[in-house]
Amino acid sequence: MERDVIATVVLPIALGVIMLGLGLSLQLADFRRVATYPRAVIVGLVAQMLILPAICLGVAHLFALPAELAVGLMLLAASPGGATANLFSHLAKGDVALNITLTAVNSVLSLVTMPLIVGLSMQHFMGTEKAIPLQFDKVLSVVAVIITPVIIGMVIRSKRPDLANRLDKPVRIISAVFLVLVIAAAVLKQRAEIADQFAEVELAALVFNLASMAVGYLLPRAFGVMRKQAVAIGMEIGIHNGTLAITLALTVLESQRMSVPPAIYSLIMFFTAAAFGAWMARRADAPAAESSAAASA
């Protein structure tokens, strides 16, 4: 009964609140902004949709993860970024407008790419005969839980921007609380085995997280993208919507074990993102300090 209540009520509500918060920060202009940052957006999307799953696949094989844990990590790789990436990008002096654009586009594209990547991952790691089918009605229900709150949030932003501004901070706080609760619930569900599972996946999750942020920052720089935009892409690529991944693992895939990698990754990414953000912020401040010193001299 407890499991049913969490899976059918608590998790959809948590995901709905988080998606509502995302919608409150989005406007149609965010999608049109793709034309403003074509190179940065294209590089970011290629990294998110193609390179990241390939890296995750390599990490899963490198650490010889058990099948369900490997699929859980792949599910996380297929998940888009979210409001948390925008927040860390702001603190790191990244291009938050680009973050919002990438979040908006990734959120739409993930409706197609997530089922595809997860389906292929299950066939690869578990074998066709062992794959858990993605029932179409459950996929539709999850899509509805994701899209409907986003649309509601965008309508509020469009019609009542003052209300959207007032709701933004409380919804972000509630979203953060829900994220903690969802992670705690996922861990508590397997508390008897969590120590072994943590040992199995912690290093893989850390390596994948560091690789994600490195690729998200270095790849754009290699293609001539400005540092501020590269910071934004690094945060977008390195910080995933762990709540979405955990919810899909527990509801659509009906696997508690698959929810462990997203839960552990979500814990790790706060520390690595904070360190990356602090480093980037100091680098951004350094030229200004040097210019000020030179002017004084």
Image: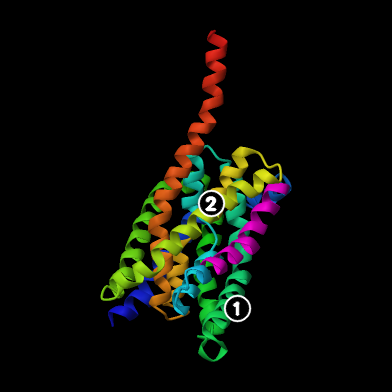
Q: Looking at the picture, does residue 192 appear above or below residue 180?
A: below
State whether residue 7 is above or below residue 226: below
Image quadrant holding the N terminus, namely bottom left
Look at label 2 and name its amino acid: Met
> Under tag 2, what secondary structure?
helix
Q: Which residue is mark 1?
A: 120
User: How was this image coloured?
Assistant: rainbow
Residue at the limit of the structure toward the top, as seen here: 297
Image x and y of residue 124, in percent: 57, 80
Instruction: State which tag comes first along the sequence, 2 or 1.
Output: 1
The reply to whether the C-beta atoms of the residues labelled 2 and 1 are less than 8 Å apart is no
At x 52%, y 26%, the residue is 286
Q: Is residue 132 above or below residue 179?
A: below
**Image quarter for residue 54?**
bottom right
Residue type at tag 1: Leu
Residue 122 position by quadrant = bottom right
Q: Is residue 214 visible?
A: yes
45 in the magenta segment: yes
- Asked whether residue 159 appears in the rendered view, the answer is no
| 72 or 169, nearer to the observer | 72
Dot 2 alpha-carbon crowd within 10 angstroms: few under 14, some 14 to 19, many 20 or more: many
User: Which residue in the structure is indicated by mark 2?
Assistant: 213
Q: Is residue 167 covered in magenta?
A: no
> Who's the residue at 52% across and 86% down the image?
131
Which residue shows up at 62% across the image and 51% down it? 101
* Residue 160 pos. (x, y %): 52, 48
> Over which residues does the magenta segment extend?
39-59
